[in-house]
Amino acid sequence: MKKISRLGLALLAAFTAVGAAAADLKIGFISSLSGPVAALGVPYEKGIRAAIAERPEIGGRKVQLIVLDDASDPTTAGRNARKLVTEDKVDVLIGTSGVPGAMAIASVARELNTPLISPTPVTIPGADGAWTVTVSQPFPLMVAGVVERMQKSGVKTVAFIGFSDALGDLAYDSLVKSATTAGIKVVANERYARSDSSVAGQILKIVAARPDAVFAGNSGTPGALPYLALAERGYKGKIYGTHGLINADFVRVGGTAIDGLQVPSGPVLVADQLPESNPIKKVAMGFRAAYHKANGAVPTDAFSSYTYDAYLLLADAASRTKGEPGTPQYRTALRDAIVGTKELVGTHGIYTFKPDDRYGSDQRGVVIVQMNKGQWKLVP
């Protein structure tokens, strides 16, 4: 009986050890599934679900995804992040769809020592950003690509209209910096709220300034407002925007008013036009296949692939992380592995992070595309 008892205890210990080794890796995913930023948030969710369907385990551990909607509200985003870490004991946070919300989550990530992978461009300097990395290309990099295109097209003056929030500020500051270097004068700085239904007054001021071009610092469906108003006023200059505009709802709402619009994008949007020698092409085409399998349709946006890249980054880092998920030690080790990523090929670029730069992208992650009768086309 003693031998049997000892055997039973040994078996119990063995099974306990196996169970511990197979502990789930928990992802706390926050996105704007409702509200003004839902045009970005819904594709974000589709992208990460496609990634997990393609690879449901990382390093022998089952991946558990917990999804919360922040309703496009930064306060809710921060509250969701706190719940996911303190109650659900997630190992990593991914989200959200807008810059203000991402900043709120980053604050919680820093306080609770939990790594955050943001699919949204967010810059948090110093120690406050120590737990955050971003898979989206930085605004200065993307806007510089647009300004280069303006310069080649002979643009001398440009007017700005953008959101009256952190994203608008980021876009405007990036435009001024690149335009000044290129010898292009910024002649207007007009703003509007994401929830506004009209920008007629702002566009009247812009048209009166007679700029060669208009650059909009906005995103999602509300990003169509300035272009619609410019078309109504008969504006004939060149129009530009940010990478936050590449989604089906924006194209639908913009209609013919956005024909000729040029924006920066990650290579994934035109993956089939990339040369075979480009390492991003294989990964980007793989994303398209995974998305189609999971969602029953081809992707028509540039956002779902950001969360797909976030998962690729997590998978790579977690495969190099030792320790037990669900513990503070594991979260710290996972953060260190994420920050230590070098030359990881994704759909939007090739990611390398540095201690003083938590954006992983470089020029390899930027192309310029133009709207042509409802389709985005690569600009050579």
Image: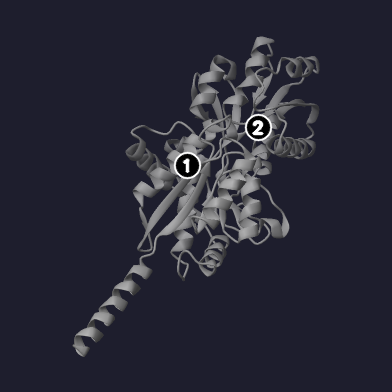
Point out residue 16 in the picture as x, y percentages from the top left corner: 33, 73
Amino acid type shown at disc 1 = Ser
Residue 109 falls in image quadrant: bottom right
For disc 2, the marked residue is 149
- SS at circle 1: helix
Q: Quadrant of the C terminus?
A: top right
- SS at circle 2: helix
Identify the disc placed on residue 334: none
**Residue at figure coordinates x 50%, y 35% from the top left:** 33
Point out residue 242 in the picture as x, y percentages from the top left corner: 62, 33
Point out residue 323 in the picture as x, y percentages from the top left corner: 46, 71
**Residue at figure coordinates x 39%, y 43% from the top left:** 50
Residue 288 to residue 117: above or below: above
Instruction: Give the residue furthest to the front.
Output: 1
Instruction: Give the residue furthest to the bottom.
Output: 2
For disc 1, the marked residue is 305
Residue 84 visible in this rendered orientation of the protein:
yes
How crowded pointer 1 is (Cα within 10 Å; few <14, some 14-19, many 20+) is rated as: many
Distance in Å between CA atoms under marks 1 and 2: 25 Å
**Residue at figure coordinates x 22%, y 89% from the top left:** 2
Q: Earlier in the sequence, mark 1 or mark 2?
A: 2
Residue 164 to residue 340: above or below: above
How crowded pointer 2 is (Cα within 10 Å; few <14, some 14-19, many 20+) is rated as: some
Residue 335 to residue 242: above or below: below
